Image: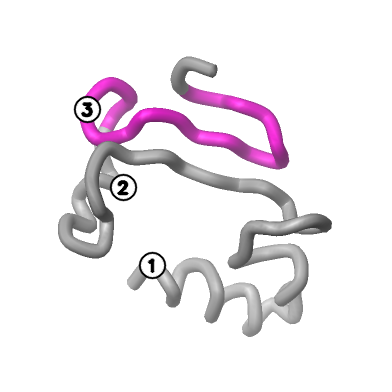
Amino acid sequence: AIRSATVHAAALLNEDGKLGRIGEGAYADLVLVRGNPLEDIGLLSGQAGEGLVWVMKEGRLLVGAA
């Protein structure tokens, strides 16, 4: 599910170099969660302070502490 929402979606949109990866030239949309979302996908639906630690969009911190 995570790869479908990131890597595979980027390929469908012809944005392989910008979306679905972490690296130079990418958009830098990231989330940090407490735990392993591969073991508990519910971590990605939580609120800040629960499983969700912070959200970064286009390299800017939107939610959480720096």
Residue 37, horizontal then vertical, whole percent: 27, 55
On screen, residue 21 versus residue 45, left or right, reads right
- Which secondary structure lies at badge 1? helix
Part of the protein shown in magenta: 47-63
**Residue 55 pos. (x, y %):** 50, 34
- Residue shown at the point (63%, 58%) measured from the top left: 22
Lateral position of residue 27 relative to residue 11, left or right: right
* Residue 53 is covered by the magenta coloring: yes
Q: Residue furthest right?
A: 25
Query: How far apart in space, not on screen, are marks 1 and 3 (Cα)?
Result: 20 Å
Residue at x-position 63% and y-position 83%: 12
Label 3's element?
Answer: loop
Reading the chain from its start, which is encountered first: label 2 or label 3?
2
**Please, what is the three-letter code of the amino acid marked with disc 2?**
Leu
Residue 46 x/y as whole percent: 25, 37
Q: Mark 3 points at which residue?
A: 50
For marks 2 and 1 on the same chain, the one whose residue lies earlier in the sequence: 1
Contact, CB < 8 Å: mark 2 with mark 1?
yes
The disc at residue 2 is: 1
Coordinates of residue 26 in the picture (x, y in percent): 75, 57
> Counting other residues with Cα less than 10 Å from the Cα at mark 1, is it few (<14), some (14-19), or many (20 or more)?
few
For label 2, the residue is 44
Number of residues whose C-alpha sits closer than 10 Å to that of mark 3, classed few (under 14), some (14–19) or many (20 or more): few
Q: Nearer the viewer, residue 13 or 59?
A: 59
Mark identifier at residue 39: none
Residue type at mark 3 is Glu
For marks 2 and 3, give the CA distance.
10 Å
Q: Image height check: is 21 above or below 59? A: below
Image quarter where the C terminus lies is: top right
Q: What residue type is labelled 1?
A: Ile
In the image, what residue occupies the spot 52% across and 68% down?
A: 6
Residue at 17% across, 61% down: 39
